[in-house]
Each structure stands twice: as C-alpha cells, then as structure tokens.
Image (cartoon, rainbow, N blue to C red):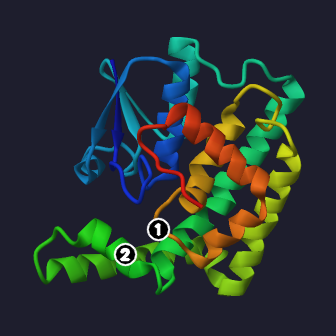
Amino acid sequence: MIKLHTFGPAFNLPDPSPFVIKVDLALRISQLPYQIVAGTHNLRHAPKGKLPFVDDDGEIIADSAFILDHLKTRHQFDLDDHLSTNDKAVSYLVGKSLEENLYWTVVYSRWIRDDTWPKIKQQFFAGLPFPLNHLIAQVARRSTRKQIEGHGLGKHTDQEITIIANKSWSALSEILGDKPYYFGDEISSLDVISFAILAGFAVSSLKTELGEQLYQYPNLISHCQRIVAQYYPAEITFTD
C-alpha cells in the first residue's frame, strides 16, 4: 500500500502544504488504496528534507511532481491522459507558474505578515516547551523570510505582492471561464495544482487580507467548492 507522509490537518485544510494537498487529492481521484502518515517528525525521514514523500511498498519517492510521475508509471494513473498534446504543454507551464510563483504568496501571507504570524506560531510551535517555542519559531520565520527573499518575491512590498497574486488569479479565472475544470468537464493535474494552492486562501480558516481578494473571482471559488464537495466533503468545511 502507498503511504503518504504529511504534516497533518491544519486550518481547515487536509494539510498546510499545498504540495501535500496536491498528492493527496491526486490519490483520492485515482482511488488507489493509500494510508496517510501524519506528523512533523516525517521531516526527519524525508529524502529531500521536505514533505510530501511516499513509500510505495518500500520504494521511496520525494517531491510531488515525481510522485505523480510514479503513479503514472507504476500504477497507470495519469491525471492528464485525456488532454491533447497542446493542452498538456499548457497545463505543465501554467502549473509550474502556480507552484514557482503564486505558492510563495501563500507562504508570505502566512509567515511574514504580522497579522497572521501569531496564528502560525501557535499552530506549529505551541507544543514546544518555553523558551524553545519562541526561539525555534523565530529561527523558522527568519529562514522562511530568507527563502522568500532568495526567490525574489520577498523583495517586493505588500502592495506589489498583492498585485502579483491578483495577476495570477485573473489569468486562472480567464482560463477557467465557465467550465467545470480548466480543460472542460474532466479534472486534470492543473485543477489539482490550482486547488492545492488556492485552498490556502479560499478554504483555509486562516483568513488573510490577501486571501479575501480571491473572492473577486467567483469562478475560482466555485472551482474550489466543486472539488471540496466531490473529494473532501467530510474533511473541509467551506465557508465564505
């Protein structure tokens, strides 16, 4: 059986990591039997120091993209097997844009903004004894800030980051239009990636000023609601 190693539920999300949600949703769609192994201790065993990773009967695969490749080669499950060659190319590049750019706006909204940081600190570090809960939290926040600045997004002002997020949302909204999914009536990897990242704004109980602006794009909210209703009806409470 496939074992999916995750952080565990938080903020009305099946996991705080969009990349974990991406793999979890793909596995739900595949209907392959799998087991979730949750806990921050998984980081100690993660081959690349990040979650998720899977253990598929002893074969360890890290990184969400490589995990989906593994599902395709070993289990003949391909989220995009119904797409044309051109649509597959578009899906790949748009998906990478979301993961390499929009994802960091989620991180920024949680870890860097002073209005949300206390909630992040409480969620992830409250269980540590004093003064470690304060010291390790600050180290983690500094490390995250350094990563965001190294990426480049952290060099921008709050207003500029809001503009960046809105441009991605606007583009996604245009691609989706009035279709159920980005490429029509059937879900694809782009829908999975989009949900995994947008859920951090639209589904999360950790409300942010940036996330509130996503509601300017009702078709994207409906897209998230559609996936919640079909794949997470018992785990996620969708409130706007």
Mark 1 and 2 residues: CB-CB less than 8 Å, in contact?
A: yes
Q: Is residue 102 left or right of residue 51?
A: right
Q: Where is residue 170 in the image (x, y as percent from the top left)?
A: 83, 61
Q: Is residue 147 visible?
A: no
Q: In this view, does 181 lie to the left or right of 101?
A: right
Q: In which quarter of the image is residue 188?
A: top right
Residue at (27%, 53%) from the top-left corner?
40
| Residue at disc 2, secondary structure | helix
Q: Nearer the viewer, residue 215 or 66?
A: 215
Say what amino acid the circle numbered 2 marks.
Lys
Q: Which of 198 and 139 is in front in this view?
A: 198
Residue at (68%, 61%) from the top-left corner?
101
State which quarter of the image contains the C terminus.
bottom right
Q: Nearer the viewer, residue 43 or 193?
A: 193
> Which tag, 1 or 2, sits closer to the chain's start?
2
Q: Is residue 91 left or right of residue 55?
A: right
Q: Position of residue 69 (x, y in %)?
A: 58, 26
Q: Nearer the viewer, residue 17 or 69?
A: 17
Q: Residues within 10 Å of mark 1 (few under 14, many from 20)?
A: some
How many angstroms separate mark 1 from mark 2 (CA)? 8 Å
112 above or below 44?
below
- Residue 206: which numbered mark, if any? 1
Residue at (45%, 73%) from the top-left corner?
144
| Residue at disc 1, secondary structure | loop
- Residue 119: which numbered mark, if any? 2
Say what amino acid the circle numbered 1 marks.
Leu
State which quarter of the image contains the N terminus.
top left
Q: Where is residue 229 in the image (x, y as percent from the top left)?
A: 57, 37
Q: Where is residue 180 in the image (x, y as percent from the top left)?
A: 77, 35
Q: Is residue 50 visible?
A: yes
197 above or below 134?
above
